[in-house]
Amino acid sequence: MSDNPPLFGSQQASPHGREGQMASLEQLVLDLCDRDLRENALLELLKKRVIFQDLAPLLWHSCGTIAALLQEIVSIYPFLSPPNLSPSQSNRVCNVLALLQCVASHPDTRILFLNAHMPLYLYPFLNATSKTKPFEYLRLTSLGVIGALVKVGDTEVIGFLLQTEIIPLCLRTMENGSALSKTVATFIVQNVLLDDIGLRYICATAERFFAVIQVLSTMIESLSEQPSMRLLKYIIRCCLRLSDNPRACEALQDHLPKLLTDRTFDRCLREDPLTCRWLQQLLLNVYGELGAQQLH
C-alpha cells in the first residue's frame, strides 16, 4: 500500500472522480480568460493551489491565461498615482499575484516566468508610496512573488533581480512598509546577499553598501521598541554576510548597528540559538576575538 497522501482526498480512488477534478480545474483556468467569470475562477483556483501541485504549468501553458492575468495587473496602474485604489481592486489583483506566486515557485515555470520579465510588472506596486491597506496588501503580495523567486538560491534569478534594481525597491519597503512587508523585503535582500554575485554587487560601491547598512541600522533601532525575532534574524544574517566581504567588513567596524554590539536583544536571541551564533560570528569577523569579547 502506498504511503503517499491522496492528491484529491477520498476521490483519488475513483478515476472518474479524479478526471472530474482535472476537468473542473482546467475549466477554471479557461474561465480566467472571460472577464465575467474571472473573479470566481481566481478564488476557486486559489483554493485548489495546495492540492494540485502542477497548477503552475497549467496556468503558464494555457492559451491566453497569463495575458489575462497581466491584463488585471496593468488595469490598476492608473490608480497608483495619485493613489486611488479601492479595497476590492486591491483584493482582486492580490488574488492574481497569488496565482503568479505559484508560477514563480514551481521548478518547471520559474525560469520561464523570469525570461518573460514578469517581475517587472510588479515593480510599480513596490514603487507606490501610499501606506493605506489596499496598497500595503498589494505591496506585500508582490514581495511574496519576488520572495518565491529568491527562495531557491538560483544565480540566474538573483542576476535578473539585480539588473532590474530590486534592491532599492526592497530598501524603500524596509524603511516605510508594514512590519510584515519589511520582513519579506529583508528576506529578499538576505537571499540576494547569500549569492556571491549579490554580495559583490552590493559591496561594489560605497554608495550601495551604505544604503543597505543604513536601512538595516534604522530597522534595528525600531526593533528595540517593537521586537520581531524573525526580522531580527534576517537583519543579523544580512550583516553577517556583508562581513564576508573584506572591504565591507572593515567598514562595519564603524557602521555596524550599535544595538547589535550590546545586550539589547539578549532575551530574544536566547530563544534562537542559530541567530545567536550568527551574531557571535558577526562580532568575531568585524572586531576580532578580543574585540568581540569586550563588546558582547
Image (spheres, helix red, strand yellow):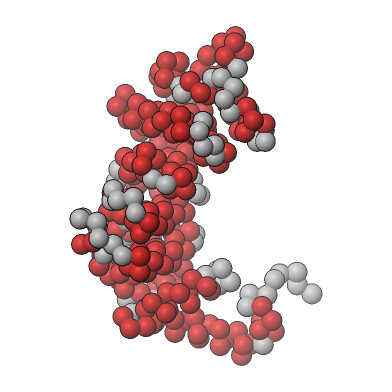
Task: List the single residue furthest toward the bottom.
Answer: 16
Task: List the single residue furthest toward the right.
Answer: 1
Could one spot residue 254 in this view of the protein? yes
- Look at the image and tell me in which quarter the N terminus lies: bottom right
Task: List the single residue furthest toward the front.
Answer: 225
Q: Identify the residue shown where x is 41% and y is 30%.
A: 218
Q: Quadrant of residue 109?
A: bottom left
**Whole-percent x, y for residue 242 in the image:** 45, 27
Left or right side of 286 for 275: right
Q: Identify the residue shown where x is 52% and y is 73%.
A: 47
Left or right side of 32 for 223: right
Q: Identify the residue shown where x is 60% and y is 17%.
A: 296
Left or right side of 248 for 49: right
Q: Identify the residue shown where x is 44% and y is 64%.
A: 98
Could one spot residue 200 in this view of the protein? no
**Whole-percent x, y for residue 263 in the image:** 59, 22
Which of these two is toward me, 121 or 139? 139
Left or right side of 260 for 94: left
Can you say whether 151 is above or below 87 in the image? above
Can you say whether 101 is above or below 26 in the image? above
**Whole-percent x, y for residue 199 in the image:** 42, 32
Can you say whether 263 is above or below 58 in the image? above
**Whole-percent x, y for residue 276 in the image:** 62, 29
| Count of numbered marks | 0
